[in-house]
Amino acid sequence: QVQVVESGGGLVQAGGSLRLSCAASGRTFSTYYMGWFRQAPGKEREFVAHISGDGGRTDYADSVKGRFTISRENAKNTVYLQMNTMKPEDTAVYYCAPGPYPYVDPGRIPEEYGYWGQGTQVTVSS
């Protein structure tokens, strides 16, 4: 069973930056897409970004494109989300999750991912 642990959240002013980390267990980490999602109070969980197992393919939600960067370090079983030029609307709990099958692009739908962690709170003040 895969386990993921998110970290790096906190309080930041608008225009600032944060880097989130997601540590995952499992010897086949490098074969799975990894996704970042977020959920604001009263809203559904939404896709932020994902990255292929080898890091060669990425996808971003329009709302974060050009401001956020997803990357991974397979030797450390870790995926990152660098968030720059942050806005108050980025405030949410951020989650990471692996895709369900090796090498398969799970797309942007949260239900296609599995093994959610507890998330990390990100708050952007105006």
Image (cartoon, rainbow, N blue to C red):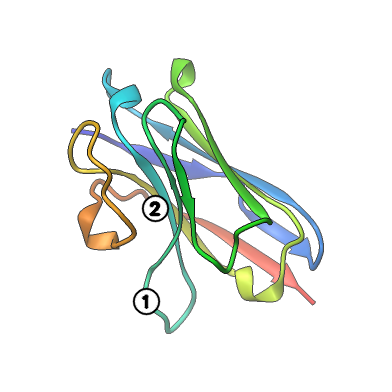
Q: Which residue is mark 2?
A: 118
Residue at the (29%, 61%) spot, across then down = 110
Q: Quadrant of the C terminus?
A: bottom right
The answer to whether marks 1 and 2 mark residues whose Cβ atoms lie closer than 8 Å is no
Q: Residue at x 77, y 60 (%)?
A: 85
Depth order, front residue of 48/5: 48
Residue 13 spot, x, y in % from top left:
80, 65
Q: Position of residue 9 (x, y in %)?
A: 61, 52
Which SS class for mark 1?
loop
Distance CA(mark 1)–CA(mark 2): 16 Å
Residue 27, picture quadrant: top left
Against 20, is 43 above or below? below
Would you name the residue on which mark 1 appears?
44
The answer to whether residue 82 is left or right of residue 58 is: right
Q: Position of residue 42 (x, y in %)?
A: 43, 84
Query: Sequence order check: which comes first, mark 1 or mark 2?
Result: 1
Q: Give the residue type at disc 1.
A: Glu
Point out the image quarter for the N terminus: top left
Residue at 18% x, 37% y: name it. 101
